[in-house]
Amino acid sequence: MSAFKYGVSLYSYTEDLGTVMSLEDAFDHVAGTGSTGIEILGETSIPTYPEPTSAWLDNWFALLDRYQLEPTNMAAWVDTRITIGRNMSAEEGAAQIAQDLRLAHRLGFKFLRPKFGVIDGDLTPDPIWQPAVERNLDLAHQLGIVILPEIHSPTPIRHPVTDAYIAFIERTGTKNFGLMIDTGIFQDRPLNKWGGGETDEIRKAALSFLNGIKVPVEHLVDVIKYVPFIQAKFHHIDETLHDHHIPWDRIVPMLKKLGYAGYLSSEYEGARDPWVSIEQVRRQHALIRKLEAEYDAAHGGNIHA
Amino acid sequence: MLERSHIQSTGFHNIGPVGARTGFEVRIRQPNYRSSRLSLIEGVDLVIDGVEYPAEQSRIRVGEREYSHAEMAEETVVRLYVGTFFTVIVPKVGGLAPGVHHVASSIRFRHPYFPPEFQPVFVRDARHATIILP
């Protein structure tokens, strides 16, 4: 029976990193969950992005070795509306992705998540996404990296944006482009706290998606073959290991049933009080590992410690 | 390391010659979860003790370099990184009086991956901070 791989995105420690937590502290916390993978945001974690210093690179590889972690995904951005008055051209978008592919490769990553600027409330990515990615498919292949846009709330699985990504994969036949599922799409109860950027304007205008877009986990069947990596988004898990928003008791069995054997990379997006995220990430790992073990036991498979 | 508050205690001071102050500065932690090109920051509005100091009248210092509001809008390479601060330089004849002030900041971030109708996003903070010298 296939087993999940476990990792943590350093996005989980937003606000702590740079105020009460260093990069090495973060490595220690990730390794302390029993994870094998670490995910970073290039522009966040690399102080001189896009060109790390040799000292930073030395430290990065020393930390990977010391904490026995492998780089999983590097998050990046294609800031299509680059100034108030001007959008990126396809050439500029392609150059941005090429730069991030090369950087991700230098750091040992296997996945690159470019976040494209959008043009409407449906989160339709700027049309340059397609030519910008297509120009980089050969480079991604040479570097052994899969480019993964995320399927992120409020965009569900069954949606023209997702359909366009799949059509691109089918048309090009590429193995170097896929989908990243953000488990926030399965959120089925309202949020009362949101990490990173909550504002009155967003709340008022908004963002009904904060109530959860409630994608049925069964919709994973449609796309799982295009999904090599999952960001395990969550917002609050209490001391009884009850997640208040994300239905792991339905997500985990579905992923197991579908034979998913990639990473579940924790992405905590809840209260940003100091040090809360460390404990929240640990609770998520305890919860998901428990559900995986229960599924395996019920289906005659191995129990993963 | 920096204070959790976006507005930092250290760095809040008057500028210009003693007796002929030309303004004041406020040091602000980059509060976004990723670095931002300066062109994606539409400005920082301040309110000190209820008096507004709009971004368009201020300058921003990043490292050693200063930018006007218009220069920031076109700067697509220089970034503000997580774990770093920048300084808002506000012209005000005479500066601020020594003592404790109520300082509020509102940073206008433009996130291209947010729908156009939600841009800019206002990221706010407020606290008491102290001017030591006249």
Image (cartoon, coloured by chain):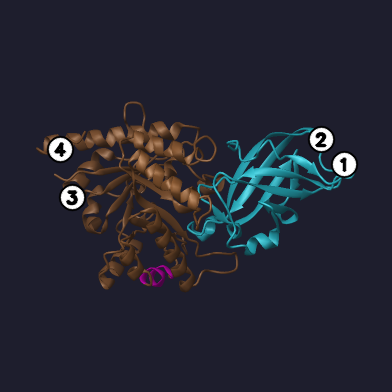
The answer to the question of whether label 1 and label 4 lie on touching residues, with beta carbons closer than 8 A, is no
Residue identifier under label 1: B18
Alpha carbon of mark 2 to alpha carbon of mark 4: how far?
A: 67 Å
Q: Neighbour class for label 4 at 10 Å: few (<14), some, many (≥20)?
A: some
Residue identifier under label 3: A258
Mark 2 vs mark 4: tell me if same chain: no
Q: Neighbour class for label 1 at 10 Å: few (<14), some, many (≥20)?
A: few
Residue identifier under label 4: A296
Among the chains pictured, the one given brown colouring is A
Mark 1 vs mark 4: tell me if same chain: no
Residue identifier under label 2: B133
Position above or below: A94 against A252? below
Magenta residue check for A22: no
Among the chains pictured, the one given cyan colouring is B
Q: Which mark is residue A75?
A: none
Position above or below: A99 against A302? below
Q: Neighbour class for label 3 at 10 Å: few (<14), some, many (≥20)?
A: some
Q: Nearer the viewer, residue A184 or B85?
A: B85
Alpha carbon of mark 1 to alpha carbon of mark 4: how far?
A: 73 Å
**Magenta segment:** A128-134
**Secondary structure of the residue carrying numbered label 1:** loop
Residue A245 at least partly seen: no
Instruction: State the residue at coordinates (83%, 36%).
Output: B97
